[in-house]
DNA sequence: GATGAATGAGTATTCATTCAT
DNA sequence: TATGAATGAATACTCATTCAT
């Protein structure tokens, strides 16, 4: 078992090593332009080895999303679990959590969108697909929960919590993508943070009842 | 002259025919997965013919953006030109305009983002590139103008008009992309419209001073 | 018949117009890289029109050779026909004739070689093929005739006249191609003439008996 | 080390295998008409494999020239290095060397000419380009050296050694090309050898002083 | 005759994936 | 397990040739 375990750990280490390399390469070139050769080189492995750990290119890409989704859920649940904090506070903390997640892996937004391609989904193993769906659902549920409380207590405007959660996520991803497209992010992280602040301030003010 | 003119029109008709086909195919498969063969088949033409009207795949794709950008600018300028309307009204009309633009061509957001790729830009003819830059700039300028007025009159919160315009666009594109990724748009246009309304309402309330 | 004749002449004029353009384009780009579109543009005609006068690209190219071969034969026969001139004189005049032919159309050498490609021959009409073979044979025969006389009179070394004729032609084409490959011709026509002189001088001295 | 070495040798073997196939195919069809598919088939490999060993079609073609140039230089330098041999002898040996080179690879002439195309040069890697230029230069230099000696000793006519070297090469390539174009080479190697002899004899006699 | 738009077969090149070692 | 050489299907783009007008 000790041996079994060590092997298991070693295997996980390799997966991580590949994913780190893949993240860098996908991040720089995008999914289509990045080649498995690129990733193998970045990971200092041979192309063949990649296929020992990931079924194919799509699954390697998707597994990146899985990791970030895990982190996302962790952070959001942590916000939700704080005792004694009102929806107001939680919303603010949620904003910060989202920013941290983005810092942890700026690809998060692109990942989330790429994942939806039916072509991509077709190539994933059912197990991975299931995990991703599960994590996405839980994350959105946790965000909704915050809004549910706020609406229930009359602190937030009377919209369906899921709609508010969707809108919250939209604002966040919209800002990221917009700034990315304007090439403003690479030049200045401060600018991104500031713009996100403005966006959230507006969102926050707009969300409050009365 | 009649002949010259008719030929010109015929040529334009073909361009449109190809663009309509391209829009469908790109829309379904995305830029990388769509092949020129696909588009030719959809347009009921041979692959070679596409190249009589568009320099290459990138330029065909970009020309789709050009058309939508033209329509976008038209609508925004129209909003701005209304006499006697306050920033409040204009903002509401701007929201409606954006929705119309989206209905005119749902690919608008994806187009805008794809366009930024430096690889893409490299392959465009300087003329087309110039036109696109010009139109994008003008559109964003027109949106900023509305916010400039609102801020100047103390109706909107005191943020830089360009920042507000960016945020406005972010909210819009974020909602679209988010719902697209959830495959909710195809299933229900009403749901999109409603979600956009919620998002804009929140944005609108958040933007108002006091 | 007047009408018939005028049409005939008009048709010939067009053929010439196309051939002049083709010569320029082939000369600049070589056979494979030159496109029918290029030639049509140079001739200020449409691509389709080219096919009214020439069966295909190969035949257009071959017809250029035909013209130059006609001129070549004319010049060589003229040298041969001079009364009272000895083989010595004739050889010198032959050298000059060759140079004139080259000036008339520098493509002559390349043409002669390209023509041999079995792929090319396959695409020629039997009639054109026959004409070309006929002209080539006659030209080489006429050159051989000069050497035949020289050998018979003991003025030239005792080699088979055809071998000498082949060698003569080889020296000429060899110099042209060699200088072309060194890009020396375009830069200086004088250099070509001088090098040809040296080559012919050597040839001349080597050819003389004793 | 043993492994490293064996791999290296295996790799070189593959390069040779491809080059042999390429030589055959280019030889038969010429550069433009030969396809990479043809070559792959001849080499009993897949098209993709060719690109593991050669950057592109141009470079594969050029590498054929490189090999023949290496052999050419080897032979010429060997002639030049013979102690006690006069320019006369060396010239004769040079003739034989040239013939051997031709037998080693009959494509030599065509290769040399194709190489000059600026289009071709553009597609070569700088390293390969440099090697080719270097070898060509050295070969011509070595030939010139023989003539330089002959002229200095008053054995050869008083022309610039480089001019004589150019002429020598011209005669050689001219004969080859001319006979090739007449399809005489394939039918009878003896005929080529004889014609080359005649040509070189003439050249030799013409080159001698007095 | 002349046109030039349309064709579609042809080709170099790339790259995800496999498999013998 | 790991390798990386080999594969071969896939694809953007070109261009000689045709044919309706």
Image (cartoon, coloured by chain):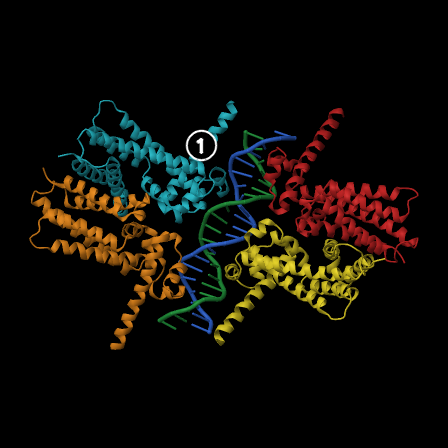
Chain colours: A orange, B cyan, C red, D yellow, E blue, F green
Residue marked by disc 1: B13
Q: Is residue C69 visible?
A: no
Number of numbered discs present? 1
The percent coordinates of residue C135 (x first, y second) are 78, 45
Where D16 falls versus B89 (above or below)?
below
Between residues B124 and C204, which one lies in front from this camera angle? C204
Quarter of the image for residue D128 reads bottom right
Could you tell me which quadrant the C terminus of chain A lies in?
top left
Quarter of the image for residue A35 reads bottom left
Quarter of the image for residue D157 reads bottom right
- Residue D179 left/right relative to E9: right
- Residue C183 left/right relative to B207: right
Where C117 falls versus B135 (above or below)?
below
The percent coordinates of residue D169 (x first, y second) are 72, 57
Q: Is residue A30 visible?
A: yes
Give the letter of the chain under mark 1: B
> Mark 1 falls on what kind of element?
helix
The percent coordinates of residue C4 (x first, y second) are 74, 27
Where C66 falls versus D79 (above or below)?
above
Between residues B43 and A41, which one lies in front from this camera angle? A41
Q: Residue at x 43, y 40 (%)?
A: B60
Q: Residues within 10 Å of mark 1 (few under 14, many from 20)?
A: few
Between residues D169 and A137, which one lies in front from this camera angle? D169
Could you tell me which quadrant the N terminus of chain A lies in?
bottom left
The percent coordinates of residue C72 (x first, y second) are 78, 43
């Amino acid at each position: 078992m000790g041996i079994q375990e060590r092997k298991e750990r070693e295997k996980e280490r390799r997966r991580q090593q590949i994913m780190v390399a893949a993240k860098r390469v996908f991040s720089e070139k995008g999914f289509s332009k990045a080649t498995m050769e690129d990733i193998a080189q970045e990971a200092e492995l041979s192309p063949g080895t990649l296929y020992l750990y990931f079924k194919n290119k799509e699954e390697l890409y998707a597994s990146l999303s899985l990791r970030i989704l895990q982190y996302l859920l962790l952070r959001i649940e942590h916000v939700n679990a704080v005792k004694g904090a009102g929806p107001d506070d939680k919303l603010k903390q949620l904003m910060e959590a989202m920013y941290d997640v983005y810092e942890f892996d700026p690809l998060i937004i692109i990942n989330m969108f790429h994942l939806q391609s039916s072509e991509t989904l077709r190539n994933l193993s059912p197990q991975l697909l299931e995990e991703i769906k599960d994590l996405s659902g839980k994350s959105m549920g946790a965000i909704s929960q915050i809004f549910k409380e706020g609406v229930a207590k009359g602190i937030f405007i009377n919209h369906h919590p899921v709609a508010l959660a969707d809108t919250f996520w939209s604002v966040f991803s919209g800002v990221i993508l917009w700034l990315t497209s304007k090439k403003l992010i690479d030049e200045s992280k401060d600018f991104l943070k500031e713009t996100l602040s403005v966006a959230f301030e507006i969102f926050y003010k707009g969300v409050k009842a009365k």
